[in-house]
Every structure is written in C-alpha cells, then in structure tokens.
Amino acid sequence: MKFDRSEKPSISSKLIFKMPSYDKFVLKNNLDVYFIKKDALPIIKINIVIYAGSKFEQPGKKGISNLLTMCIDEGAGEFDSLQLSEQFDLLGVQFSVSGNNDTIQLTLQTLKENFGKAIELIGKILISPHFDEKDFKREKRKILTSLKQLKDDPDYLASTSFKSLLFGKSNPYSFPFLGLEKDINNIINEEVVSYYRNYILPNNSFIVIVGDISNKELKGSLDKYILRWKTGIFDAQFKSTDKSDEKVVYIVDKKDSVQTEIRTGHHAAKRNSEDYFPKHLLNTILGGQFSSRINLNLREKQGYTYGAGSSYNYYKDSAYFSVSTSVGIENSANALNEIFKELNKIRDGVTEEELKFAKSSIVRKFPLSFETNSQVASYFIGKVIYDLPDDYFDSYINNINSVTIEDVNKAAQDSILPELATTVLVGDKEKLIPQLEGKDFGKVEVINNF
Amino acid sequence: MKLLNISYEKYKLDNGLEVILHQNKNLPMVVVNIWYKVGSAQEVKGKTGIAHLFEHMMFQGSENVAKEMHFRYIQEAGGTLNGSTSFDRTNYYEKGPSNFLEVALWLESDRMGYLLPALDQDKLDNQKDVVYNERLERYDNQPYGLAWELLITNLYNKSHPYSWSTIGFADDIKNYTLADVKNFFRTYYAPNNATLVIAGDFKRDIAVSLVEKYFADIKNGQIVNPLKISNGKLTQNKIITHKDNVQLERIYLSWLSDKAYCKDDAALDILSDLLTGSKNSRLYKTLVFENEIAQDVTAFQFSGKYGGHFTIVATAKPDKSIDEIKSGIFNIISDLTKNGITSKELEKSKTGIKSSFVFSLQYLDSLADHLNSYNFYLNEPNSFSYDLERYNKVEEEDIIHVTDKYLSNPYIELRIVPKDNES
C-alpha cells in the first residue's frame, strides 16, 4: 500500500460527547448534595468539601486547619484511631482527609457493595470525632517533623516562599496550609476542637458523589448517616487584600544546591472573572503545555531545564499568575532572562495559528476530562467553589471557540505583567548574586533563613 | 471476577510487530500504547542511561515529522502523551478523543520506522542537556534522591543489568555519541521487538487497516535474545553511609528477592502491605504510631524480569537513632517469622488489593499499559484475574515462608545522614 507519509492524517469525524448531568438536592441539615451518576464500573467516589481551609485561621494560629485534618480521623464514634482505620481496610475503602487555603476535604472511594458502610463511617468522623489529647500530641509532633523535613525540599521551599512574598504577611493566602512551626508549637487540642465546632458544619459544606448508585439508595444512606450532622452558626467573614505587586528578586539561600528553583509572577483576576477563557487560551500558548512557548524555549531550544511552564492559579477569593522551572545553577540568570523575554514578547500578541492550535487542543481534550469518577468530582467541586454558572460545562466549548485574537491580546496586556513580577530563586546565593549583577529583574534581596 | 475479564484480539504483522486490540466504548476516547522490549538492562557499561535518553530522542521528530511537531500534533488533536523507561522496557503512549487514532498511529509508525534520517548532533546535544537537568532535578537535588542508585549499585553484582539506574550515571550521560544512539535504535527499535496496544472506542476493522497502512512497511530488525543473567547472592551484610542535604536520618534495608510473577512475588507484595501498608500494619503501628521513633516507614517488593529486591525504608524522628529503628524492624520481622500473622490481617490486605484492581479499571491508559505488561511478562494480555488470583492464593504460611526465606539473608544497609552530622 503506497501513500504519502509526509502528509498528516486529517481529523474529520466529529465527536459525540454528552456531558454527564447532575442532580442537586439539599439535605434537611442544609448540606448541599451534587450527584452525578456514572455506572460503567461498580465504584463510587465521595467528596465532602468544607469551607474550613487555612485562610480562616487567626494570626498566630497558622496550622490549626491542617492539624484538624490530621486529627479528625484519629478515632470517631465507638472506634479509636487504629480501629477506625481498620474499619476502612476491612471494606477495601480508600479514605483520606486533605486541605488547602480554602477548604478541607474528606475523600473516599469505595466499591458499590460497601457504599452504605462507608457513608456510615464518614458520618461518624464528621459527627463524633474523638480528638483525644494523646492523638493530638502525636499528630502535632508528626507535622513539626514534616515541616523540618520540608526545609530540604527545594520545590516546597520555592512555592511557599513565593506565595508568602507575593501575598504579603497580612493576606491569609500567603501562609502554607501546613502552617508555621512557631505557631504550631503553641496550638493546643482545645483550639482544634473549637475550630471543628466553628467550621465543620453541614451548612458550611457540600458533598459531591460520583458513581454507580441509584438516587434512592443515595438519599437513604445520606438521611440515615449524615442527617445527625447538625447545622450551626459560623463566621464566614473573610477578607483578602492583595499586596501591590513590585518587581523584586528574592534569593532564598540554599547552600550547596546543584539547581535553582525559579518562580516568578504577580496577582491576577479571580476565577469567575470575565476574561477567564481568553487567559486560559493565552496561557496555553505561553506555558500551559509541553509545546508552549516557554518550555520550547527553555527546554527544547536552550536545554536549561527538564521542564518549564506557567499557570494562572486560582483560590476562591484571589488568584495569581506564575512561571516555574528548575535549572542548573549556572544557567539561573540566563533562564530568568529567557522567561522575561517570553513574558514581554507575548504582550506583543499571539498569532492566529497559535490561537487555532490552543483552541483545538482544549476543545478536543475536553471529553477526556470526565474519564474517572475522581476527575468528574473535581470538576464539579471547582464549579461550586468558584461559583461558576449552572451551564458552565455545557457552554464550555462554545466559550472557548468564541474567544477572538483581540480578546487574547487584551488579556496579555492586562494579565501578563513582567514589570510587576515578584521573583523567587531558591539556590546557592554565592553563585546566584554574581549572575544577577547588571540584570534588570528587579532589586535583589537575600533571605538567609526562610 | 467477571469485571476483570478483559476481552482482546492479538495478532502479528509480517514484520513481527505484535498488535493487541481492546474495545471499550465507555467514553469516546482511545489509547495507543507501545512497549519496546528494551530497558536499561540492555545497556552496556559506560553508556548507562541510553535507553532512557531514547525516551527523549523519540520526541525529537522523525523523517516526516519535524522537531517539536510530535507533541504539537497530539495536543492539537486533544491528546496527551508520554513515555517511561524501566529496567525491562520502554513505553510510549497517547490518549485522546477517538478520532485522533490515525494521527497517533501515523506518529508512532514514523518514529518506529523513520527516526534515524531526522536524528542529528544538535538534537542529541540538546536532549543530553535536558536529561542531565532531569538527573539534577529528580535525583541529585532531591533530598534522599540518590538512595535508589546507591542501593541497586551495591545490591546487585557488577555484571547484573539492574546494578545501574535507568537515568544513567552523570558521566555516561555526557558521553553518548551519535553513533551510540543510532546503533541502539537499529538494534532495539524494530517492529519485531515491540507490541502495540490500542484500547478504547474504535471500529475494529478500521483499526486493523490503519495498523497495516502505517506499520506494515517498516522493516524488521535482528532478533533480540533475552539476556543471560547470573543472579549472584550477597554473601555478607554491607553498610553504606551517605551524607546528603537532609535534616533527618533515613535507613534503607534491602534484600535480593524474587522476580516478577515468580513464585514468591505476590506473597512478598502482601508482606510489604502487612508491614507498612496501613496504620495497623506491623512496622507502622510500632515504629510510627506507638513508639514514635520513626516519622515514616515503607516497605516494597520491586520485581522485574531479571531480578527483584525487597526493601524497608524508615526515617528517624529528630533525635532518634536509626540503630533503634533498625533493631525495631528486626524484632518485628523475627516475631512475624516465629508467631505468624492473623487471618484478619491477611484478609484486609487481600480486600485492599481486590478493590484497587477494580478502581484501576477506570483509567483507560493504565488498562492499556496493563495489557502490554501482562503480555510482556506472562505472554497473556488478559491476566487481570490471574494476577488477582496470585494474591488470593497466598496463605498465612506463605507469608512466614517468604519472610524467612528472603529477610534472613545478608542485606544492604544504606544510611542517609545530614551533612553536618559527624557520624
């Protein structure tokens, strides 16, 4: 069979993809329930999302919400810590508690046959956690040790120091979810219990369930095991004021590093702002995937790095743009120079071809986003947290396709701001300072002990 | 379990390319997954890491695909892609909407058949830099990042092909020549040394004719014979101390064990779960939960085609000694050998394994990779039930038996300690 190999096959057929539809209802205790039926496999995913993330912590108490996530499943109902863990093991259920600046999440994956028992256990954890002093002390020692360990982790150090310097100490988003060592030392068990009482409430939460279960069985189990979770009064006041951006390079000294971790960026508009779609396309062209400008330059052209990229990062009440990469220490200033070049260049505009490529990539990839129960759950969680419109998924492809090149170029002007970029370099200051001399990345400040 | 019975069709092209098709119409998507039966085990001394370098060179374009365009075509079609290298094999995979199948096959076939005309010194030099940075980022600059390399270089004898890591030694990465790379390609990247899996939503006859169209004209290569390996034994314990940029001391204990899918492999997997897989597991409960001498503890059975090892890793709490942890570990092992385990412990492990088999079926790319993996190791792609059955068959006595058989042998003890600590 002879054919011309140099000709790329065309993609002709249109895909038919139906968005999974969802059912929303409210339990009598004011818990919002989002249910997406997906019955290809006998699996159910449950996510309970609680607006109790670390941004609600008071000054001097940074680390309470993480301690809560560590302690809440250390015994509940008739089970102590080890017994409770064993109950999950006997069911083959995967259970975890996690958190971030905005929320705390209880996540569970179970086979269909064990759904009722799994919900019963999660109900006990929400309603009657033990918070034993002994468990609290052990978990506190564990997190203090983890924080000590993380001081060695260049990636963690770069991300947390960048956020801290970008947001500034008066903004709750500037603190890492894991907390601050000096604060954790002073936190006592009673404070965790009171944080639980104040925030872990059904009317401050929502639950997303994805999987193979009937509406009736779901409602039955939720009524039976979750209704006793009592509505309460909580203080949802939250204000975040963003520090104004300033062009500064911070060197976080890490002696003997063989690489430099680079983060640079600035504040951006919130997730539900109108120019989300132009910005999403813009970032896809700039640094969102392998074949974006930044990676092609820093990795494929210069060979400075294993990978480089950019992203708009969203919180419920704030957002920022950042570029991140790690490079051999001798190329730190060169790499930063190329990053700033790319940021400046994209402000001159993108090409029609680039936009077409980005649209094609995003639109065609869309159905793949709904492959697993976890993926579906996380998309719906995002929709709720960021308060996106009800037809968000149905109109998604249309919203991408209708963005014009003028929209993208305007987004570049408004939302790529190298002149206001905060830069963090985690690496050996002795080798970094000489490289930065005479360069225009902003004034240089050295932080010896972050 | 009926769910785990995965239907497939397997056949061979005249040039030796093995093809496995699995239809799954849950979503309008398709996965292409190719295994080349070459990994770091096929490398020679002085050129370690070249199999992994290939994972990079294969994305640098081929005769009909310009540099960078491989990624662009897949992403333009809405797909995602990657590759990975292990001791035994290198894989490449694309996942995308079902209408991207032809593009994926075109790209995979072009680099299988027509990579060399597009390969030049500039591309090689660029990717040597990228790989060198990958090594810095993922190994040298990571806390405890050199542990794996230190373990295997000491555990396996110098002539065993698992005695170096897939990333390759830093000096070797700098030394590959264009001729090395071309020879490696000619030897191992031939259709008769590869298996192509297509999984997902596609029409069977169209897939068969597309595979024929794009792959049939690629010439077969020489036959690659399996390696002949002499698995040595450790004759005595070996203690290695390595100083690193870390705050906490960490101890690794590693014993040579059984190969992938061989007699004791599954029991060793279960043993690792019994020791460290949950809060109630033996080592975790004692060292981390009750005595708090360790911050974390992990055990795992690594197994490949030519060898395997069982490893226990524990990080000391600040001011706790790894000697105390070490004796804790050995006490628990000896208790287990002496008094055995409970049927409840075994049941929990088996339940967890069964659930994770079902959970994993959600991921089409993992399913496709499993078909290739089972085909490679067991010569039967549909081995999900067989694999699960290996675990179900393990009995309490088997756990005692493998613990005694392997963990009473000489071992490698690696201690990673803080640089400023004069130990």
Image: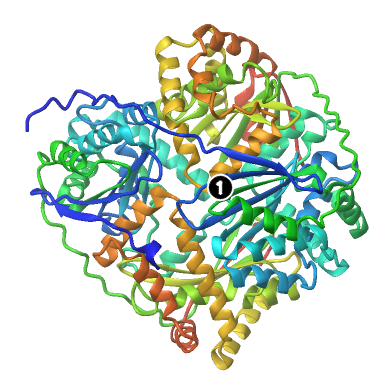
Image height of A446 relative to A70, above or below? above
Indicate the position of residue A220 as horizontal and vertical percent values.
Answer: 68, 57
Name the residue carrying label 1.
A374
Residue closer to the observer: B116 or A358: A358
Residue closer to the observer: B362 or A294: B362
Q: Residue at x 34, y 63 (%)?
A: B5
Q: Quadrant of residue B336?
A: bottom right
Q: Quadrant of residue B416?
A: bottom right
Q: Is residue B140 left or right of residue A188?
A: left
Q: Is residue A10 left or right of residue B277?
A: left
Q: Is residue A96 visible?
A: yes
Q: Quadrant of residue B229?
A: bottom left
Image height of B382 relative to A388, above or below? below
Image height of B55 relative to B369, above or below? above
| Subunit that carries the residue with mark 1 | A
Residue closer to the observer: B252 or B244: B252
